[in-house]
Image (cartoon, rainbow, N blue to C red):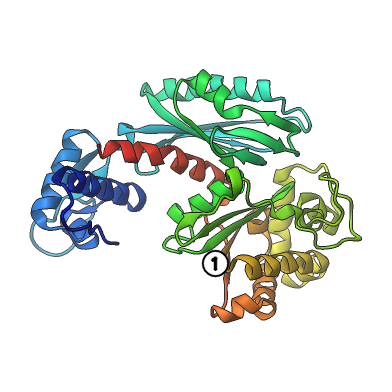
């Protein structure tokens, strides 16, 4: 990582740039010494001292001795982000539940709660009310102000104002979620598609750290994708990108709620997985995950029972890789819970059948390391982004 700025930059610009680079490094990668900061960011010792001292005076960082000592002599102090210096609220709205958490600077979760939604009963007004009431409960436990919020929604979201244009599995159309939550919470609110935030989470704190070209593909009731190319999120017109679940893979297949037939999510979504495992379509997520864990203990049985499902999952990923050429595909939600032999077959098919994968010396397929917290983590990072920018002024 380099912190070099153009020659001739004004002192104030250089100061803000360096302050932002140090704070972002500590927020994303955790505590380290001043010497490590200087090396990683390409700054001299006097500059690092001035930046760290300034951040400490602002209450954004502190310094402490490491918990473990190594070698002789006095250990160097660690520069540590102060979690309570900036708190954000993360909200993950799903078909069956709403999860919320408070994140401190540095990514630490300081409190969380969740509640279930009855299928087909996710009325926008009730969800907004639940979020507002739960935010008060979470904040009161810490007695600290929350400065921003990020919200994950399984649907098509207009990035500019958080309007949920269409969240079919919630039954929402043109819901001004961003405006309603911003008014109720009295703070900036960023609303985005859940898979987009999953990609952000994996690139900043998950298995895709340091990978500039990656995709997050998540399967639950529907299937969505978040895309990061060249280190930047790709959102399409107005932020509408990533509806991979409605890529038609089987024209003579099942009818999809979107009006088409044979969409990818009809072959690999939660209902398709339940059919493959001969489970009721209304089974709870806990029971479905338990079934997958049990199946993982018998690789041969897993490959047999999920043979068709595996083929459709592999086919869709081959199409995605050919289209977008990611270096890494991260599988989230139910896809991340699939037995290892199934994922190995899927990864092999992507390597063998995708001409783009072969051309870039193979696209890797990996499961998410963030489990079901991926959307929450991504929502928190979306909320932190403007805070980190403001903190450098």
Residue 317 is situated, as x and y percent measured from the top left of the image, at: 68, 66
Q: Residue at x 72, y 57 (%)?
A: 292
Q: Quadrant of residue 341?
A: bottom right
Whether residue 298 can be seen here: no
Residue 383 is situated, as x and y percent measured from the top left of the image, at: 44, 37
Residue highlighted by disc 1: 328
Q: Tell me: 68 left or right of 360.
A: left
Residue 275 is situated, as x and y percent measured from the top left of the image, at: 85, 55
- For the N terminus, the image quarter is bottom left
Q: Is residue 128 above or below residue 282?
A: above
Q: Tell me: 308 left or right of 225.
A: right
Q: Is residue 254 above or below residue 329?
A: above
Q: Nearer the viewer, residue 44 or 72?
A: 44
Q: Nearer the viewer, residue 203 or 183?
A: 183
Q: Tell me: 21 left or right of 48.
A: right
Q: Tell me: 210 left or right of 90.
A: left
Residue 176 is situated, as x and y percent measured from the top left of the image, at: 62, 27
């Amino acid at each position: 990582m380099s912190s070099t700025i153009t020659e001739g930059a004004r002192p104030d610009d250089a100061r803000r740039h360096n302050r932002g680079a140090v704070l972002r490094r500590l927020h994303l990668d955790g505590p380290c010494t001043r010497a490590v900061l200087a090396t990683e960011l390409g700054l001299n010792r006097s500059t690092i001292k001035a930046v760290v001292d300034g951040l400490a005076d602002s209450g954004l960082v502190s310094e402490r001795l490491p918990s473990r000592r190594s070698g002789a002599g006095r250990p160097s102090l660690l520069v540590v982000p102060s979690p309570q210096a900036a708190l954000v609220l993360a909200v993950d709205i799903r078909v069956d539940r709403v999860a919320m958490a408070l994140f401190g600077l540095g990514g630490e979760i300081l409190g969380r709660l969740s509640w279930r939604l009855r299928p087909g009963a996710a009325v926008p007004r009730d969800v907004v009310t639940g979020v507002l009431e739960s935010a008060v409960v979470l904040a009161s436990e810490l007695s600290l102000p929350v400065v921003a919020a990020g919200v994950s929604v399984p649907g098509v979201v207009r990035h500019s104002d958080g309007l949920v244009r269409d969240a079919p599995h919630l039954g929402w159309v043109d819901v001004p979620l961003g405006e309603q939550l911003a008014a109720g919470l009295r703070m900036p609110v960023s609303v985005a598609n859940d898979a987009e935030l999953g990609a952000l989470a994996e690139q900043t704190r998950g298995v895709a750290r340091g990978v500039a070209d990656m995709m997050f593909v998540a399967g639950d009731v529907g299937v969505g994708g978040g895309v990061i190319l060249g280190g930047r999120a790709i959102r399409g017109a107005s932020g509408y990108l990533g509806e991979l679940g409605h890529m038609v893979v089987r024209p003579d297949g099942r009818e999809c709620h979107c009006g088409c037939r044979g969409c990818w999510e009809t072959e690999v979504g939660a209902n398709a997985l339940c059919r493959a495992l001969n489970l009721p379509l209304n089974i709870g997520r806990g029971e479905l995950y338990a079934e997958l864990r049990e199946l993982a203990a018998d690789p041969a049985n897993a490959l047999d029972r999920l043979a068709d499902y595996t083929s459709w999952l592999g086919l869709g990923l081959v199409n995605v890789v050919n289209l977008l050429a990611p270096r890494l595909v991260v599988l989230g939600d139910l896809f991340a819970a699939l037995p290892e032999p199934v994922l190995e077959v899927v990864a092999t098919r992507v390597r063998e059948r995708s001409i783009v994968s072969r051309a870039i010396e193979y696209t890797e397929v990996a499961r998410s390391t963030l489990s079901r917290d991926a959307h929450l983590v991504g929502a928190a990072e979306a909320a932190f982004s403007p805070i980190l920018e403001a903190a450098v002024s």
